[in-house]
Image (cartoon, helix red, strand yellow):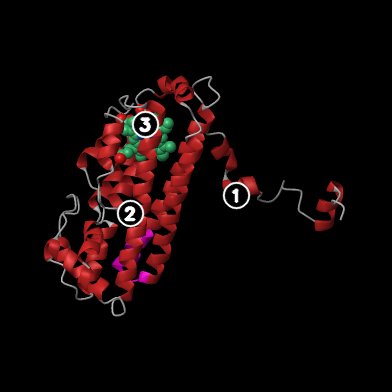
Amino acid sequence: MTSPKPEDIVRDEKAQLDFSRSMSYGDYLHLDAILNAQQPLSPDHNEMLFIIQHQTSELWMKLMLHELHAAVRCVAQDELGSAFKMLARVSRIMEQLVHAWDVLATMTPPEYSAIRPYLANSSGFQSAQYRCIEFALGNKNAAMLKPHAHRSDLLAQVQAAYEAPSLYDEALRLLARRGLPVPASHTQRDWTRPYESSDAVEQAWLVAYRNPQQYWDLYQLGEELTDLEDAFRLWRFRHVTTVERVIGFKRGTGGTSGVGYLRKMLDVVLFPEIWKLRTDL
Ligand code: HEM
Ligand SMILES: N[C@@H](CC(=O)c1ccccc1NC=O)C(=O)O
């Protein structure tokens, strides 16, 4: 076998080469906007990695929110087949973001120190999309709206996520519609309140987990939620570990204690009864 000649390939394949009158790859993907959005503030080589790491994370978060919002609607409308597909995709995206830490971890402490002064008070703490994901997954906290007060467009989005029932709230309403004994305190409540774990809710999930054949879709929903929280915990863990290896115990640019704050977030449990029931099965 000899390699094909470069000049033969395109001619033989009859590839389209003139895009003066038709939409090209870059047109469709708006690559001019995306690829001109990397504007390093420092003279440091590694800032490009830092920027692209965050921009790609924000793009994946955009898709995650798109899928999560649709999944919440599907659960509310008893369309579980579609919801499972979307939730599985959200978990795979989260896993993708877990692996993305491997790229950022190639940045050493002195490399990051060269960039950090240029970040001023900006921080991932102010990510509107991240906060919408936390709220959609039920981790509600009014204080987290404040960093968006100066941007009415973003505030409206974060506020909507804050006020809406979370994925777990809709899952519990579904259990109740299926005749499982979820108390009214958990099917009709002020959705802005942080979720409170309940023995009665655990008992409702236990009915499905003890009779998987009869409640197959609810059992599957429970396991999809477990996958999602599992992946999210891994993301939080990789974040705090990367932060410790890069800045140690310095305070965060966002004003928090840094590693101390992120470690506290490791204790957040999104779907508490789904974890508790494993001990009681
Ligand atoms: C060298 C890399 C990084 C360092 C040193 C770092 C550091 C920190 C610190 C110290 C905080 C606490 C808030 C503060 O006071 O600033 C934080 C929060 C946060 N960071 Fe990072 N981070 C890094 C990379 C990333 C990446 C790649 C993402 C992906 C989008 C990210 C997303 C977030 C988010 C969403 C929060 C808020 C977490 C929460 O409120 O639970 N960070 N980060
Ligand atoms: N909080 C980080 C700064 C930081 O990581 C950051 C800054 C601007 C844009 C994204 C960031 N990433 C995540 O927090 C720090 O304290 O060094």
Cα separation, mark 2 vs mark 1, equals 34 Å
Q: Amino acid at mark 1?
A: Tyr
Q: Amino acid at mark 3?
A: Glu
Residue hosting label 2: 229
Label 1: element kind: helix
Residue hosting label 1: 28
Q: Amino acid at mark 2?
A: Glu
Q: Main secondary structure of the magenta part?
A: helix
Which one is in front, 180 or 10?
Answer: 180
Q: Quadrant of the N terminus?
A: bottom right
Q: Earlier in the sequence, mark 2 or mark 1?
A: 1
Q: Are marks 3 and 2 in contact (CB under 8 Å)?
A: no
Q: Is residue 150 visible?
A: no
Label 2: element kind: helix
Which residue: 22% across, 65% down?
A: 172
Q: Nearer the viewer, mark 2 or mark 1?
A: 2
Which residue: 27% across, 41% down?
A: 265
Q: Is residue 142 visible?
A: yes
| Other-residue count near label 2 (Cα within 10 Å), few / some / many at <14 / 14–19 / ≥20 | some
Q: Quadrant of residue 215?
A: bottom left
Which residue: 38% across, 45% down?
A: 235
What mark, if any, has residue 244 been given in the picture? 3
Q: Earlier in the sequence, mark 3 or mark 1?
A: 1
What mark, if any, has residue 136 been given in the picture? none
Which one is in front, 67 or 17?
Answer: 67
Cα separation, mark 3 vs mark 2, equals 23 Å
Q: Image check: 260 left or right of 124?
A: left
Quadrant of the rendered image holding ligand 1: top left
From the viewer's perspective, is residue 89 above or below residue 162? below
Q: Nearer the viewer, mark 3 or mark 2?
A: 3
The part of the chain drawn in magenta is 70-80
Within 8 Å of ligand 1, the CB of disc 1? no
